[in-house]
Image (cartoon, rainbow, N blue to C red):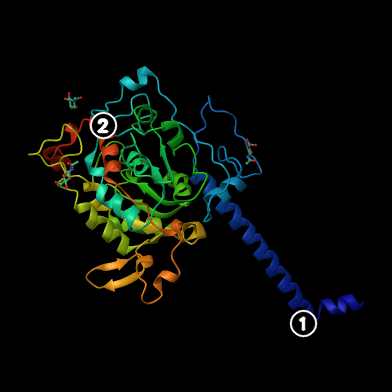
Amino acid sequence: MAILKWLSSASASAFINVCCIILLCMNLIQNNVSIHERAIRQSVVVTQDKDDPPVVLSANGSLRGSVSSDNTMAAISMVIPRGKAVALPSIKITEEEEKNIERSFYGGKGDKPHLGGFTEFDPMGVSPSLWKYMITYLGIKSLLDVGCGRGISTSWFITHGLEFVQCAEGSHDAVMQSIVPNVKEHVVEHDFSRGPWWPDRTVDAAWAVEFTEHVGRNYQPNYITAFRKAALIFVTHSNWGGWHHVEVHNDDWWRVRWEAAGFVYSEYLTKSARDISRKDSGLNNLTLDMKPDQGYSVGQHIRLSIQVFINPMVASLPEHAHLFAEHGCFISRDDGNVDCSVLQKKGQALTPLPESFKPLILTDDMDKEWLDLIKHLNTSGRRIEEAAKSG
Ligand SMILES: *[C@@H]1O[C@H](CO)[C@@H](O)[C@H](O)[C@H]1NC(C)=O
Ligand SMILES: *[C@@H]1O[C@H](CO)[C@@H](O)[C@H](O)[C@H]1NC(C)=O
Ligand SMILES: *[C@@H]1O[C@H](CO)[C@@H](O)[C@H](O)[C@H]1NC(C)=O
């Protein structure tokens, strides 16, 4: 009787209403989570080939395939991916299939047609002046080269003494023709259309030049995991057509795309990178077949489209605190700052910076070592008249 009386009271109906609302909310949350998981599982598209080893799931975060939603969620959500990613190399095509692909001067023989698209030496993707700025002014000492082709840029960073350089490249043909010294140590063959990958450690910078236009947005989460391991991301896009260019957009599109992924656009670093790469546009002495009376638009893709993003999750870690390596002690507006250990008068030398905070010192011999690696490459496919035609 007491229960019946209580049930008909106002406080009981309020109580029941609250219970219903809580149940409804829990249901909504649960639905939302599963929709979110499904969406993510769809976006990390993994092509499982018949020859692939079986999908192995492990509690320690190593990832093979996308079947474990927990692992995949953890790997591609807004965190630094942990554990060891397993590289998924290019799935080769048959000679018969290769015959039906017209690659023209682009490399990628034997790879699925979404891969390749590299040339022997593409001067438009290199900028030694910008690379020097990245080392000596920004203080970069470790780098991931995403989509390095034959490894022209990767080789520059290796020959200039970085403590860690790794490239991820999808084309088996490119890896086979790589000019990178100790290729096994530095180059990982991974096709981002097959699944996510990331390096074992965090790096000061990711360099992804002439890469993003080649990979459809449905596979972007697979390489965002690699970007998430870098403190700074230097990334270009194409403004025109080319081999398997499936994402051609303007600066604004790419800026919102990477901001939507959680990276912070830097107007200052973007402008600096573009301005500095402009200095290299007239270079015509990089390879032996470059002619003094020709123009080669060196660094053109960089000065037209590079954007620089900050990934605060990595940039804020103590192991990356040496970045932005401008000297801290003031002499005069005109002379620029100096290393504080040279100034005595106002106590500056009393707290010298640890060596690990100082940028690497570059030498002419390093430049020579790199030039020796590239000097025999054929640049002739990309002279200025052809560049003007295609762009
Ligand atoms: C993680 O798990 C994988 C697969 O079970 C295993 O091969 C690997 O050695 C493990 N790595 C670590 C660091 O325990
Ligand atoms: C190449 O040309 C540039 C600009 O003309 C010059 O500064 C540089 O010293 C040259 N490099 C070599 C190795 O000759
Ligand atoms: C360089 O490439 C051009 C065009 O593909 C070709 O005609 C030429 O023979 C090549 N030169 C060398 C030295 O390989």
Rounded to the nearest whole Å, what is the CA distance between mark 2 and mark 1?
A: 81 Å
Quarter-of-image position of residue 119 = top left
Q: Residue furthest top?
A: 96
Q: Is residue 109 visible?
A: yes
Eye-nearest disc, 2 or 1:
2
Judged from this view, the residue extending furthest toward the bottom is 10
**Between 93 and 85, which is closer to the camera in this rendering?**
85
Q: Quadrant of ligand 3?
A: top left
- Work out which residue is located at the far right of the displayed protein and give it: 1
Q: Label 2, secondary structure: give it.
A: loop
CB of mark 2 near ligand 3 (< 8 Å) = yes
| Quadrant placement of the C terminus | top left
Q: Position of residue 62 (x, y in %)?
A: 59, 41
Residue 193 in the image: above or below residue 227:
above
Q: 276 left or right of 227?
A: left
10 Å neighbourhood of mark 1: few (<14), some, or many (≥20)?
few
With respect to residue 50, does 299 lie above or below? below
The residue under label 1 is 10
Residue drawn at point x = 78 percent, y = 81 percent: 11
Q: Residue at x 34, y 40 (%)?
A: 159
Instruction: Inspect the image, locate mark 1, and give the three-letter code of the amino acid beneath it.
Output: Ala
The reply, left or right, for residue 2 in relation to residue 192 is right
Question: Looking at the image, which residue is at 57% across and 48% down?
Answer: 82
The x, y position of residue 254, in whole percent, is 34, 54
**Residue at the disc numbered 2:** 120
